[in-house]
Image (spheres, rainbow, N blue to C red):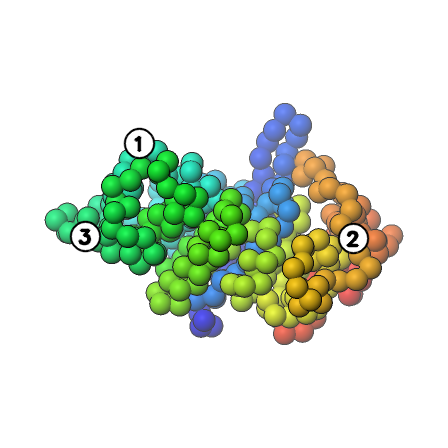
Amino acid sequence: MSNYTILSVSDLRKYFTTAEGVVRAVDGVSFNVKHGETLALVGESGSGKTTTGHVIMGFYPPDGGKIIYKGAYELSIPMKKRPLELKRDIQIVFQDPGTSLNPKRLVKDIISLPLLVHRIVDKRRVYEKVAELLEYVGLSEEYMFRYPHELGGGEKQLVAIARALAPNPSFIILDESTSALDVSSQAKVLNTLVKIQNELKLTYLLITHDLGVVRNISQRVMIMYLGKIYEEAPTEEFFKLPMHPYTQMLLSSIPTLSEEDEKIKPRGIESVGEIPSAVKPPSGCRFHTRCPFAKQICMEKDPPDIIVNNNHIVRCWLYE
């Protein structure tokens, strides 16, 4: 990992108008991603983490803020209007490969499409390159002639990863890329992602609710709740010293299989309640309705970002 900032997000906002009102899915989010690192964006369903990734990809236009890529590209423009080199350099691997892979196409055609669109190799070498990509992610050449429905969940996701690698990207968004897999398939996919990152010097934005995955492959962690970032820290410090009550609640909910896992669980705090509606979020700190330590100021004022130490930032009145 280098100190070069490959992605800079500043005061990002994305709202959706519904019959019930305006959903503030992403509401003033700021962060930087360093070249070569894995930054994990963690939160419950409805926190806004996937929407954040989709705005970066250009699936949705932002309603405010800036996204700067490699210090030169403004990512507020939709995917269709982005220059080809930008489309090539930023890729995504979705949660469910069963829906992200075309069921009517053979694997060789799925992976060859970005190779042809971005003119990565000569047309005469396309299928040779497809075979190389499959082998690189741990699948044999025979998978070229299979349809997605003939593959297991882990195999489908490895094909999706091979497709994402095809245009030689620098930055990949992993949107819950292992959550739909069984434990053995998840381990294989994670090992593959770590291997290719180390060898190709890739940068990942890992969007997940699984803190076990975060602990194994990320270097930094951000905790998102109702459209806002409430804690950010290096991964090792994050698990040793979780500061925000919401972070502590998430960690206390992790199923443990070993004494080592049990040691990192905060004591005296339990997961209670459900995430409120983003249409009418609570006033003040949005977590105060579930927080066992909430004070009067928590109900009235949105807390500021407080820098604690070692790039550890917490958004909580308890640490003012």
Q: Earlier in the sequence, mark 1 or mark 3?
A: 1
Secondary structure under tag 1 reads: loop
Mark drawn on residue 104: 1
Q: Is residue 63 visible?
A: yes
Tell me the residue that label 2 is attached to: 270
- Residue 142: image x %, image y %? 25, 47
Query: Looking at this view, is 57 or 251 the one in front?
Result: 251
Secondary structure under tag 3 reads: helix
Q: Earlier in the sequence, mark 1 or mark 2?
A: 1
Disc tally is 3
Q: Amino acid at mark 3?
A: Glu
Judged left or right of residue 309, residue 176 is left
- Residue 53: image x %, image y %? 50, 48
Query: Looking at this view, is 75 or 139 the one in front?
Result: 139
Mark 1 and mark 3: Cα distance apart in space: 21 Å
Query: Looking at this view, is 98 or 14 the one in front?
Result: 98
Tell me if mark 2 has few (under 14), some (14-19) or many (20+) residues whose alpha carbon lies within 10 angstroms of its own: some
Tell me the residue that label 3 is attached to: 128
- Residue 290: image x %, image y %? 79, 48
- Residue 159: image x %, image y %? 35, 47
Residue most extreme to the right: 296
Q: Amino acid at mark 1?
A: Lys
Task: Identify the residue at image location x=43%, y=48%.
Answer: 154
